[in-house]
Image (cartoon, rainbow, N blue to C red):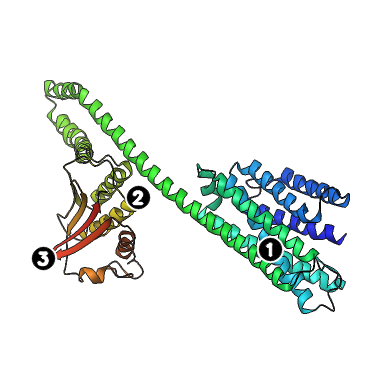
Amino acid sequence: MLLFFYGFNYVLVSILFLASIGYRRIINRNDIVCLTICYILAFSLFRLGIISEQIISTVYIAILFLVLLNRTRNWLLATILASICYSTSTILWYITFRLLHVLFADVSLGGYPYLILPMPLFIITELALIAFYALFAWAVRTFDKKYRVIEIFMKSDRNYYTLSLFLLAAVGVTDIFHVFTFQHDLPIFFSLISFYSYVIILILAVFIGYFVIRTTNQTIYLHEKTAYAIQLEEENREVNYFKHDYQNILLTLSIFIKNNDMPGLRTYFFEELNQYSEEILANENILKDLQKLEILPLKGLLIEKSEQAKEFGVKIDISILETIDTVQIPIIKLVRCISILLDNAIEESKKQAESRVSIEVLHRQKETIFKVQNSLAAAKQQPEAMMKDGYSTKGKGRGKGLASFERIINGLDNATYMIEQKDNTFTSYIFLTNK
């Protein structure tokens, strides 16, 4: 009976954890019923001698994984959630019932899983275990709400089958070792190995989750930039269609002239046609400047920054003389670096009247150079000081950009940078070696 209750603890806290972070999204009522019935069946098979005590919890982990997989349709997410559920449950057992047995062996009677306690103490310990788990579940739920962890996992287009199977196997082996250790009353050294194994699995599951979230976010970011560039190119095609309607515009103008309606013509031309044409031509000129840039995420970024600069009255000049279709560093890192340089250049330029930011891309046989240049409103610190983490002219706590830029470039084997300040001009270079 104690073993049944001990195992049911795992079922209860697993359901509590999963329901708290995503009821209906991660687990629903049918899944809860399924987990409960499966545990009762597994325990019954154990009592009948069909399966051993060493694998009953491993079977439950596999069932929990299958239930989560059926709900999420994501192998790695199901694996990580199952691993976190079980490893956290076992760690909490170690710091409640197991620790109580070690410290107060005369009170904690009987063998593994050390549940024979005076009733008041048992109730307090059980409530403490559930409280710890509820607190952990609340922390995970808060983190998920803030960073949309589950949603990002759902957007991942990779299942990481090998990684999932490895993590599941690690949990299964650790669980078998855990049961074997206590069944055969091995020295405490082995139970410490078991405890730290669960801690490592928990850390590993969290680390893998962080890695996947970061990778997926980068992929989403690049897809958004690519889609943005494609959308603007589509708009450029629409501009070309507009040219075919040029005769219709002339016809409209001729109607005003034939009717000698000069006030109406003046209103139509200056308030409608002229303003609209200027906006169309401005966008068309930007797209023409970027025709030779075939890296769509970077093209999308430059278009976005050009429109952002225009809102502040800053003109962006782009010069790309040769076709650029690839670079030898991760696109996400190049986009991040160029974004930092342009944000700083636009921020400085908007303080000035008639300001410009120039972007130049030079492609040579062994090297690609990105150059961002802007004028300065006033004398600045030396470039070395500006690269320090925390430096900013925009206020306290906003000086992370150039320091991040330096860290990204220094972390790449085939990339270097140079920043120079001459007279009232600030210029940044990124040099990429073409392997």
Q: Are marks 2 and 3 in contact (CB under 8 Å)?
A: no
Look at label 1 and name its amino acid: Tyr
Q: Indicate left or right for 275 with 218 as reference.
A: left
Circle 3: residue type: Asp
User: How far is disc 1 from disc 2 in space, using C-alphas?
Assistant: 40 Å
Q: Residues within 10 Å of mark 2 (few under 14, many from 20)?
A: few
Location of residue 17 (image quadrant): bottom right
- Camera-nearest residue between 183 and 3: 183
Q: Which residue is mark 1?
A: 133
Residue 412: x %, y % from top left? 32, 57
Question: In the rendering, at what x and y percent does residue 45 appear?
Answer: 84, 48
Find the distance from the CA under tag 2 to the CA under tag 3: 34 Å
| Residue 358 falls left or right of residue 26 | left
Of the two numbered discs 1 and 2 on the same chain, state the one appearing first in sequence.
Answer: 1
Q: Which residue is nearer to you in this view: 435 or 146?
A: 435
Q: Which residue is mark 2?
A: 330
* Kind of residue indicated by mark 2: Pro
Label annotation for residue 423? 3
Of the two numbered discs 2 and 3 in the rendering, the one whose residue sits closer to the viewer: 2
Q: Is any atom of residue 14 visible in this view?
A: yes
- Seen at 80% across and 46% down, the residue is 37
Which residue sits at x=30%, y=54%? 339
- Which residue is at 31% across, 41% downward? 296
* SS at badge 1: helix
